[in-house]
Image (tube, grey):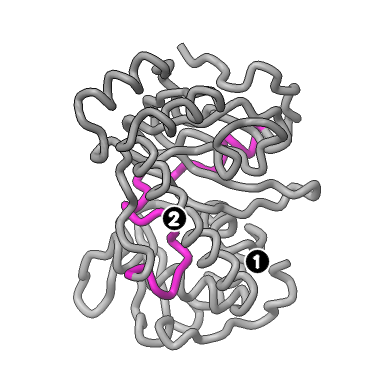
């Protein structure tokens, strides 16, 4: 049974709870890449795995401090604004970090996998969480208090190096997201996202590519910082232009060459 990882958490709004349970259609197949919105995924590299840094002594030190918990699909690990008590290492599963504005708009930071953690950047606790985190699929995590993280950083070389690896990778993710949001229009971001999904999930269907992961329009909107309504209208326009089509199990991209060139769609100003 899921137990709260944030003891002082304030009650969530009904809108927030509806959001948690409405946006996980394709995300349970989240890509090994943490950030799906990037024009240079190779620069990010693969996600680090903290556990690979640990020898037997380090593992024992970690397990004596951590509390292993199961977090079911759609359940939150932490919420922005809640008191920050520590971090959660991901033993298995997929966890999504995101920010929700007071208006209800959402931006997805990344999908974190085995060996990464959520709860940064303040890994020693204190203050408030800057991001929310939710299990995209049922996940097993190791919860560590800020004090335990500090102690392990001082006593376990493998753990401290693993934490630094993860922090470096997260900094790259923040940079990529800021660059894409700050320099690309919503249309360009949507085009780049579809190209990346073709690369990660694409299956050749004649001269087209079928994206074999059923991400909802809300999922796509959250990844590019747009509204669901704008994404729906933009995909409809792309279909009318014969760039994409809607298949029974996902989107079909017919002109990836046009998407790769960053072809603009109309009415970008309605995306934000």
Marks 2/1: CA–CA distance: 33 Å
Q: Residue at x 36, y 14 (%)?
A: 64
Quarter occupied by the C terminus: bottom right
Q: Is residue 14 above or below residue 211?
A: above
Q: Secondary structure at mark 1?
A: helix
The span picked out in magenta is 17-42
Q: Residue at x 35, y 23 (%)?
A: 62
Q: Which residue is mark 2?
A: 168
Q: Position of residue 92 (x, y in %)?
A: 32, 32
Sort mark 1 into few (<14), some (14-19) or many (20+) by Cα contacts within 10 Å. Answer: many
Residue nearest the observer in this picture, 52 or 1: 52
Q: Residue at x 56, y 72 (%)?
A: 180
Query: Residue 36 — which label?
Result: none
Circle nearer the viewer, 2 or 1: 2
**Magenta stretch: residue 35 in it?**
yes
Mark 2 or mark 1: which comes first in sequence?
A: 2
Relative placement, left or right, of 272 versus 143 is right
Q: Position of residue 72 (x, y in %)?
A: 44, 24
Q: Position of residue 202 (x, y in %)?
A: 27, 65
**Magenta stretch: residue 266 in it?**
no
Q: Is residue 44 above or below residue 135?
A: below
Q: Secondary structure at mark 2?
A: helix
Q: Is residue 228 above or below residue 270?
A: above
Q: Which residue is mark 1?
A: 230
């Amino acid at each position: 049974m899921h137990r709260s990882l944030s003891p002082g958490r304030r009650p969530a709004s009904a809108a927030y709870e509806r959001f948690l349970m409405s946006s996980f259609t394709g995300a349970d197949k989240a890509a090994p890449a943490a950030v799906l919105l990037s024009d240079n995924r190779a620069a990010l590299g693969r996600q680090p795995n903290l556990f690979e840094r640990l020898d037997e002594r380090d593992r024992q030190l970690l397990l004596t401090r951590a509390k292993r918990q199961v977090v079911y699909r759609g359940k939150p690990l932490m919420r922005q604004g809640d008191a920050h008590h520590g971090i959660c290492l991901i033993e298995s599963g997929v966890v999504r970090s995101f920010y929700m504005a007071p208006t209800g708009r959402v931006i997805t930071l990344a999908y974190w996998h085995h060996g990464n953690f959520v709860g940064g950047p303040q890994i020693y606790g204190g203050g408030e969480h800057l991001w929310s985190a939710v299990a995209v699929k049922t996940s097993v995590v190791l919860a560590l208090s800020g004090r335990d993280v500090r102690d392990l950083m001082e006593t376990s070389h493998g753990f401290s190096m693993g934490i630094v690896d993860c922090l470096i990778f997260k900094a790259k993710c923040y940079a990529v997201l800021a660059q894409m949001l700050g320099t690309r229009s919503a249309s360009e971001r949507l085009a780049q996202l579809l190209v990346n999904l073709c690369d990660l999930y694409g299956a050749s269907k004649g001269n087209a590519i079928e994206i074999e992961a059923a991400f909802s329009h809300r999922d796509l909107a959250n990844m590019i910082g747009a509204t669901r309504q704008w994404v729906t209208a933009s995909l409809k326009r792309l279909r009318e232009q014969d760039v994409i089509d809607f298949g029974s199990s996902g989107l079909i991209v017919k002109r990836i060459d046009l998407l790769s060139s960053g072809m603009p769609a109309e009415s970008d100003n309605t995306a934000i």
